[in-house]
Image (tube, rainbow, N blue to C red):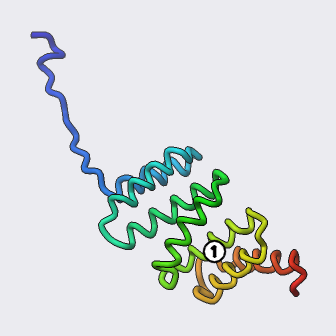
Amino acid sequence: MSEIENQKATIIEVIPTSEFYFQRGIIAFQKNEMDRAKKYFSRAVTLSKNEEESIFASCQLAICHQHTGDYDESIEILNELIEKNGDIFAEAYYFQANNYAFKDDLEQSLIFVEQYLILDPEGDFVGEASELQETLKMELNDF
């Protein structure tokens, strides 16, 4: 027997979970590999064992679509999140405001950014949301 035949292969068991695919999606996103990130986040959504996992994976998927200019797809995902979980996941309103701003629908963007600021006045994106709100108001001449 050769030396290679005598060596035993090490098999590493991988149990695919939502968290596993979510982490892979984050890595792909950070590397700007959006197509891979979308696949991983989509898989994470389907394997989610609870609402929280599903929300975060769906949101990341929507952000990936936003980064690739697929605003309508991002809007669809975020609309679903807002409809089901908008009161507990206010960030979805901020991300949706960005989608509409990118689509040049400034009125709709303003509605979403203001809703975010109402729901989460001390949230992670308050600074960015306030700047967006100010810019939108100036653009719409609505001081």
Where 79 sits versus 1, above or below?
Answer: below
What residue is drawn where x is 66% and y is 79%? Answer: 112
Q: Amino acid at mark 1?
A: Tyr
Q: Residue furthest top?
A: 1
**Where the N terminus falls, by quadrant?**
top left
**Of residues 135 and 76, the one drawn nearer to the viewer in this rendering:** 76
Drawn side of residue 5 relative to residue 51, left or right: left
Determine which quarter of the picture holds residue 79.
Answer: bottom right
Determine which quarter of the picture holds residue 134.
Answer: bottom right
What residue is drawn where x is 56% and y is 65%? Answer: 76
Q: Residue furthest right?
A: 141
Labels in figure, total: 1
What residue is drawn where x is 32% and y is 59%? Answer: 47
What residue is drawn where x is 46% and y is 78%? Answer: 84
Drawn side of residue 12 relative to residue 45, left or right: left
Drawn side of residue 78 relative to residue 47, left or right: right
Residue 67, position as x, y percentages in the image? 64, 54
Residue 120, position as x, y percentages in the image? 58, 85
Where 24 sits versus 89, above or below?
Answer: above
Residue that carries the numbered disc 1 in the rendered image: 94
Residue 5, position as x, y percentages in the image? 14, 16
Residue 38, position as x, y percentages in the image? 50, 51
Q: Residue furthest left?
A: 1
**Of residues 104 and 124, the one drawn nearer to the viewer in this rendering:** 104
**Where the C terminus falls, by quadrant?**
bottom right
